[in-house]
Image: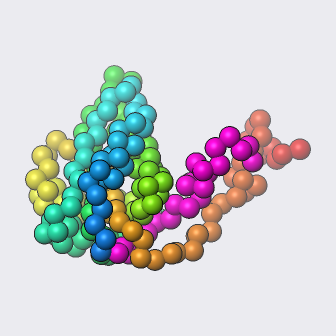
Amino acid sequence: MPTSDMRFFEVINARRSIRQFTAECVPVEVLEAIVQAGLESPTGCNAQLRQYIIVTDPAVMDRLRTVSKAMDGAPAAIVQLIEPKPTQWGDFHLQDAAASIQSMLLAAVALGYASCWIEGQVRRSHEEIRRMLGVPDTLHVSAILPIGRAAQQPRRPEKATLAQTTYYDSYGRKKA
Ligand SMILES: Cc1cc2nc3c(=O)[nH]c(=O)nc-3n(C[C@H](O)[C@H](O)[C@H](O)COP(=O)(O)O)c2cc1C
């Protein structure tokens, strides 16, 4: 592997979906740094259709945690909202949302915290989450990221390999 920035790849490899958290509070500066990483991600036509809600109020967290078992004990969360608005070159809002979420997941790990991508938009409780947080109808809740210290160390799930998924110069052509 090229060794230009090993720490970056350590973060990539260390990231796991964590679904149980300790009660340790997360400083708001940490949560803002994670959102900042999301804001740095690319967006189609630079449309920047995302907004965020940082949740630390224990009463709001108690309600939010009812949305998914994957937020067990989480003391904080970042809720990503997205305006499903097409650009003049096409509708990229789902891709924009995903790029930002991945950056935030990696930023959390880089800062010593853990998270899990909890889907919002296709959830049965999407409307309920929207009402819970006072989100206007013009925005979708694209994801909820619980943030906290990991209280579990799940094994790396099996991942497809380079040999299984990757071709060279044309589809189906293996490495010489
Ligand atoms: C689009 C998307 C939606 C996901 N939604 C959920 C979810 O609602 N709840 C959950 O527990 N995990 C969710 N996950 C996490 C996946 O289950 C997890 O990434 C996968 O099992 C691989 O594990 P890893 O993240 O530790 O590599 C989601 C992941 C993605 C990319």
Say if 49 sits above or below 166 in the image.
above
Q: Between 105 and 122, which is closer to the camera in this rendering?
A: 105
Q: Residue at x 70, y 58 (%)?
A: 161
The answer to whether residue 123 is left or right of residue 170 is left
| Horizontal and vertical percent position of residue 20 | 38, 75
Region of the chain picked out in magenta, as a range: 1-22
| Horizontal and vertical percent position of residue 140 | 24, 48
Q: Between 25 and 136, which is closer to the camera in this rendering?
A: 25
14 in the magenta segment: yes
Say if 82 sits above or below 91 in the image.
below
- The answer, for residue 123, to whether it is visible in the render is no
The answer to whether residue 43 is left or right of residue 48 is right
| Horizontal and vertical percent position of residue 16 | 50, 65
Work out which quarter of the rendered image holds the C terminus and state it: top right
Q: Between 38 and 169, which is closer to the camera in this rendering?
A: 38
- For the image, the number of numbered tags is 0
| Horizontal and vertical percent position of residue 106 | 47, 52
Q: Between 11 and 82, which is closer to the camera in this rendering?
A: 11
Q: Residue at x 30, y 62 (%)?
A: 26
- The answer, for residue 106, to whether it is visible in the render is yes
Q: Residue at x 31, y 71 (%)?
A: 24
Q: Residue at x 38, y 25 (%)?
A: 45
Quarter holding residue 40: top left
162 in the magenta segment: no
